Image (cartoon, grey):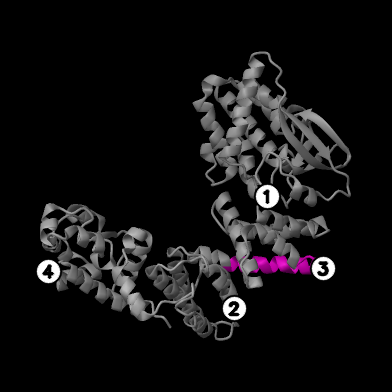
Amino acid sequence: MKDVTEASFNAIMSPSRIQFVIPIWQRTYSWEWDQWQDLWEDLMDLYERLRKGESANHFLGPIVLKTIEEKVGKITRRVIIDGQQRLATLLLLCALIRDKARGNGDDKLAEEIDDHLLFNEFAKKTEDKPKLCPTEADRKIFNKILSAEGSEELGEDNQLSAAYAFFEYKFEEEKDRFDLEGLLDCIRALKMVTIRLEEDDNPNRIFETLNFRGKELAQADLVRNYFMMAVEDESIADQLYKSVWFPMQQNLGKGTLERAENLEDFIRHYVVMIKHATVKKDETYREVRQRVKYATEDEVISELKTISTYSKHYEKLLFPERESNMPIGRGIERLNRLRVGVHYPFLLKVYNGFENGTINIEDFLIVLKTIESYVVRRIFQRLPTHSLNRLFADLCKLPQKDIAEALQSELAGKESWTAQYWPSDSEFKESFSTLPIYSISPERCRFVLKTLEESFEHPEKVDLSGLWIEHVMPETLSQAWKDYLGESWEDIYDTYVHTIGNLTLIAPSPNELIKNKMLSEKKKEWYQESNVSLTKEINKKWDEWSPDDIQGRAKVLAERALKIWPRE
């Protein structure tokens, strides 16, 4: 290290012709409510001490920099190895103070913040003007904030805009605790230690081990850093980030947090697929590093591009509407509605085989239907899911040739005493009729009812999106229902009310009007007018709704379910 210097935030940020740059291998801005709240309370405490004339030194933590010296007259860029979260947050606060000052007519304070803390006053190039240059993913929104567009103009799901909105709320909620100029003085007075690295210091290794006032590095952050730093030529690394990593990251979600979570999960699923074994969340980076530990630079780049290719498959698994093949998209969407997710590593393998032509569309669709049948039958059998991660990791060993047949054979071969068992027809029929599926999972119950309805194969498509789940025997029993069910009404209610035999689909408006009425009234007032086949069937076949009738309908639906979710 060249030197270690203590300085105030003002001393660090106020010099002209200086720009702090976040390198491509750094994570995006990731502070959340806890970090913002801590900083705010620190500032309020510092403000109060300054107001009372007390000693007000407050150490915010170190900043690690690597300086890039440029020609005289140009901007000096300092690459931030650690400290971007603190600097970005403080600059957001400065921008907010500037916006509030300008709104109050204090243009002098606003201009002072712009000229000394936010921008390089004499910079000629637009990209040289901001004092902080974030990563590609954050740059647009950060520059919007610095350009005084305000939180209402940001219009993006981004942690930077969330931070601005948080502090804007604090300004309004606690406006009696401070004045703008005094708060700015507190920010300027914050103490930091700047650590400048030698040219031969390894910034990536330092970044991995530093864990100051912020969040731990995510596994995906470490993976990105490893790949970027493995490429010696910075221009090639920069191009790889922009053309490979950044698009992959951006395509896996709509907002910063969603993208980060999905990227983290994807890389772990990818490693599971490669290893054919489960991998803990905190072991993902270690596994990736081990995989390319002795690889050449060209092999490292090739691996990164391979990961990017698989990320396109994962993108479609998360967002099936992006799949151009409609039957495949529908099959994936159905699995997503079951909210399982353990099948992702295996489907990454299948998707890749489909894209490169070694797996045909028929087999792909059979795979999707087989997994759905396996999951649905296990849901009704109430079998545990803890062993399924290991199962689907192991299934990644299956050869791509005849993969649909191989998958069915593997699952059918699981014995009934194992945790990975695929329930038989007789077991499924029994549990399908008796399980209180609605009370266990209304969302999965809706999926089952909608699938049953779709199985009637309407000549014209029926919109099922706005329908509600209707309990024929209502969730709240009237006295008429209790009298109808007899002395054992409580036992009958507890046994059948949430089972599939007692459930159908109906529009929300009539549901509110008829929900507690007797079956005869429901039939007269709505069921006979319904376009939903499940409800029309009740209207046509049942005039009574005793336990025998509920069981009878459940058996009818169970036969239909066996055809929808066959075992092989």
Tell me which residue sits at (21%, 74%) in the image: 552
Mark nearer the N terminus (3 vs 4): 3
Membership of 306 in magenta stretch: yes
Q: Disc 1 marks which residue? A: 217
The amino acid at mark 1 is: Leu
Q: What residue type is labelled 3?
A: Thr
Find the distance from the CA under tag 3 to the CA under tag 1.
Answer: 26 Å
Tag on residue 296? 3
Q: Which of marks 2 and 4 is nearer the N terminus?
A: 2
Please name which of the two marks, 3 or 4, marks the residue nearer to the observer. Answer: 4
> Viewer-nearest of labels 2 and 4?
4
Q: Position of residue 272 (x, y in %)?
A: 62, 68
Question: What type is the residue that disc 2 sits on?
Answer: Gly
Name the amino acid type tagged 4: Asp
Image quadrant holding the C terminus, namely bottom left
Kindly indicate whether the residue at mark 1 contacts the one at mark 3 (C-beta within 8 angstroms).
Answer: no
Circle on res. 353: 2
Which of disc 1 and disc 3 is earlier in sequence? 1
Is 217 included in the stretch rendered in magenta? no
Q: Between residue 349 and residue 240, name the one nearer to us.
A: 349
Q: Quadrant of residue 166?
A: top right
Which of the two discs, 2 and 1, labels the residue nearer the N terminus? 1
The foreground one among 31 and 49 is 49
Q: Is residue 195 visible?
A: yes
Q: Are marks 2 and 3 in contact (CB under 8 Å)?
A: no
Percent x, y for residue 59?
A: 72, 29
Tag on residue 439? none
